Image (cartoon, rainbow, N blue to C red):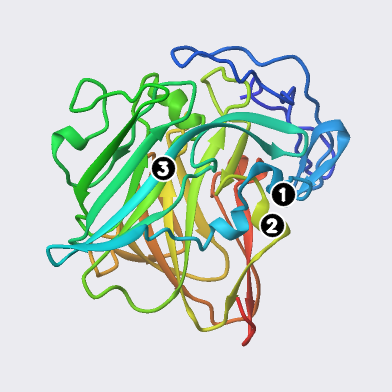
Amino acid sequence: MTSRRRFLAGAGGVALAALPLRASADTPPDHHSPPEPGGGAGSGGGHSAMGGANGATFRGGAGVDHAANGFDPRTLLREFDYGTVSTENGRTVRDWTIRAEDRDIEVAPGVVFPAWTFNGSIPGPTLRATAGDLMRVRFVNDSEHPHTMHFHGIHPAEMDGVPMVGRGIISPGEEFTYTFDAEPFGLHLYHCHVGPLAEHIARGMYGTFIVDPPGGRPPADEMIMVQHGYNTTFDGEGNQLYAVNGIPFVYMNDPIQVRRGELVRIYLVNILEYDPINSFHLHGNFFDYYPTGTRLEPSEFTDTVIQAQGQRGICEIRFPYPGKFMFHAHKSEFADLGWMGFFDVVDGAES
């Protein structure tokens, strides 16, 4: 573990060891490359701080330029893309255009990660449909690397988005439209399925799609949380940063505001590469958990769930008390390196 990061003494502080300020964006898609020289670590200040570049303290995502990145995790949290809606033969049809884009993303102050993305963000857009809709996803490969879109769910083999089946790999400059029924209802993933698969996922090629049940779910304050990490050294052995929705610690600096007593629904997804499991723990409360969201009855009432890569589920919560309530991975190393945040429970204010 010490080869991946170093823990410094002093007030329980955490710092990253030799985290590259910028890794090469020219890595061929079929092998890993070493990081460029550079990087640095500062001193952290306890459970909610991480040492950043040039000795700066990285607290709660402060210092990251979301506008320059082209996406903001605070907006992405509640952003659902219902596509362009039309009707064909009495059936609802939803159309999207998704582009593979190579994008440099500042994941911590001064730390730029050469990402491969869907529509320029990590994670990609959250697509949303209702069971029985026809989904058409036009995938355009504007990246310098070959990619696909593989959708979890039920669909024909030729729409599976894997090499050597159907359309297969979509090379740079090419495009293909994936067409399939929205089924089953629940919470699903999409991701690139080109080898080496671990690198394509670790670089950022993933997103979520939600299929609502007929009649929908009870009204709630809904949000998406995609758990993932960054292997900034590109050694394929582990991650130096952990995050939800793109940027480590972002919901520490800007807690997620919710209303006391209101139903909160979290679409929780784990796409973390290089670590076998991830987890979600909520302080001061319990939630109903619906694995994969494919049943309308919860499987348990708990405050902690564990997910392997590709697993996902829906958490439904009501907060009876106002105040700030922490949530984080119940693996302390993941939390110390970015996977943690706060809910700010308020009375009556707009969330």
The answer to which of marks 1 and 2 sits earlier in the sequence is 1
What secondary structure is found at the residue carrying circle 3?
Answer: strand
Residue 39, numbered circle: none
The answer to which of marks 2 and 3 sits earlier in the sequence is 3
Residue occupying the point 58% across, 16% down: 26
Q: Which residue, given by chain and number where applicable, does mark 3 sit on? A: 98
Cβ atoms under marks 1 and 2 closer than 8 Å: yes
Q: Is residue 76 above or below residue 30?
A: below
Q: Which numbered disc, 1 or 2, marks the residue closer to the eye? A: 1
Please state which amino acid type lies under the numbered disc 3. Answer: Ile
Picture quadrant of residue 35: top right
Residue occupying the point 59% across, 40% down: 242
Q: Is residue 229 left or right of residue 300?
A: right
Q: Which residue, given by chain and number where applicable, does mark 2 sit on? A: 252
Q: Which residue, given by chain and number where applicable, does mark 1 sit on? A: 61
What secondary structure is found at the residue carrying circle 2?
Answer: helix
Q: Which numbered disc, 1 or 3, marks the residue closer to the eye? A: 3
Q: CA distance from mark 1 to mark 2?
A: 7 Å
The x and y percentages for residue 66 are: 69, 48
The x and y percentages for residue 210 are: 33, 57
The x and y percentages for residue 32 are: 52, 14
Which quarter of the figure is the N terminus placed in? top right
Residue count near mark 1 (Cα–Cα under 10 Å), binned few <14, some 14–19, many ≥20? many
Q: Is residue 239 above or below residue 130?
A: above
Please state which amino acid type lies under the numbered disc 2. Answer: Met
Q: Is residue 237 left or right of residue 36?
A: left
Q: CA distance from mark 1 to mark 3?
A: 27 Å
Q: Is residue 340 above or below residue 326?
A: above
What secondary structure is found at the residue carrying circle 1?
Answer: loop
Residue count near mark 2 (Cα–Cα under 10 Å), binned few <14, some 14–19, many ≥20? many
Q: Is residue 55 above or below residue 132?
A: above
Nearer the observer, 202 or 314: 202
